[in-house]
Amino acid sequence: MSPLSSPPRVDVTASDFGQFGDPRGTFCLITDEAGLTSVRCLPGKGYERVLHLALPPGQSLGELLAERVPADADVLVACPGRFIGSPAPGELGTRRLSVLPAGSTPLTGGHVRYFLESAARTDVAGQEAAAEEFFERAGASERLLITDDTAGSEAEFDHGAGDCVWNQQAGVLGPGEQQIFPAGKLSVTAAEITVFSPEARLAGLRGTLTLRGWPIVHRHADPADEPEQRRLFEALAPLVSHAVHLEVNGGTIDRVTPAEAGARPAAEALEALLAAQPLYRTVWELGFGINTGTEVMPANCGPNEVHGARHGVLNLGIGVTPTTRFALAFLCPRSSLLTADGTPLLGARKAVRRGRLQRTSSASCGCH
């Protein structure tokens, strides 16, 4: 289904959402009021019932869980336009929680329906295996390389230099755990992902990174930021077709250069942002989308960060709200992540088949 279409209702089956593990007891779907009529969730195999609730304005998710949701339920939250704060450990209990990030970017009802349907097709076991392989091979390599063969750029990431934190938003949830929805993102951040430290940086990152793909501009909860968020996204949108190079040294962006004339507006917008707020110069996150079952949405869409194409997609994050007014992520589908010996871990180069000569079967000796 296209995320731009608006059917009167979408039907989903709770037991199809594999990131919750073995279905049991109650599945709780929490939406806005519109979702009560636009989404129908059936229990499927294993769940005894589905509880479909609307999150009232002014009430926190933790309060709703405590008041109306069984202590061992599996909970999926999809409320477009709402900023959902994580429940405190005491509020979450043993519930397994997955939240669609639907407040920081302008998701439509069509987007929500699309991600509900695509997540029901997610190969969770495949994501778990991909994550295990990724971390094992990345950890065994003394450094990682980020290349863009089309642009001819290369950066090095020595993950042993300074402090960094590896994160996994993929695989099966355990009791009391929470995860983004749909699942499918791995990342390394300069510090704990929820706590921005102005001094923290990916100290081992240096070289040239190439941005060419859909940008994402997240905002915090203040609606007054929406016009500037829209303007900034539109200014960065030329990155979809035109590349910008970032010169990075010690995890800090030193220079922004357009690779071609069409990229100049995006480069100028990014340079202006870095000049106005130096905190944006810190590369806060290297992300790795591994969800191969979602298409990239041609819009300012936060869940695009899990998009993994066929062989994984690298993305770059700068800024963390509310410390910075916006948090920016850049999908880099033409980039590759390699181990120190040049073995592809993820991205465009992994899609290139090697070791097999290509042969033609047509008769083309040139004499007829």
Image (cartoon, rainbow, N blue to C red):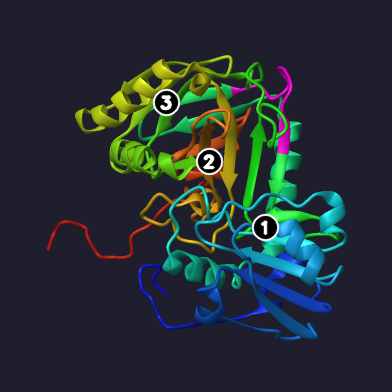
In this rendering, does residue 262 appear at all?
A: yes
User: Which residue bears the numbered disc 1?
Assistant: 127
Mark 3: secondary structure: strand
Asked if residue 95 is positioned above or below residue 261 in the image, the reply reads: below
The residue singled out by tag 3 in the image is 153
Highlighted magenta segment, given as a residue range: 157-166
If you read the primary sequence from the N terminus, does the residue marked by circle 1 or circle 3 appear first?
1
Q: As rendered, which of 176 and 189 lies closer to the eye?
A: 176
Amino acid type, callout 3: Ser
| Picture residue at 42% right of the left edge, 41% below the top | 224
Image quarter for residue 13?
A: bottom right
Disc 2 designates what residue?
A: 220
For marks 2 and 3, the one nearer the N-term is 3
Q: Distance between the Cα atoms at labels 2 and 1? A: 29 Å
Mark toward the start of the polypeptide (2 vs 1): 1
Residue extending furthest left? 368
Tell me how far mark 2 sits from mark 3, CA to CA.
Answer: 33 Å
Residue at 72% across / 81% down in the picture? 50
Q: How many residues crowd mark 3 within 10 Å: few (<14), some (14–19), many (20+)? A: some
Name above or below for residue 76 compared with residue 24. above
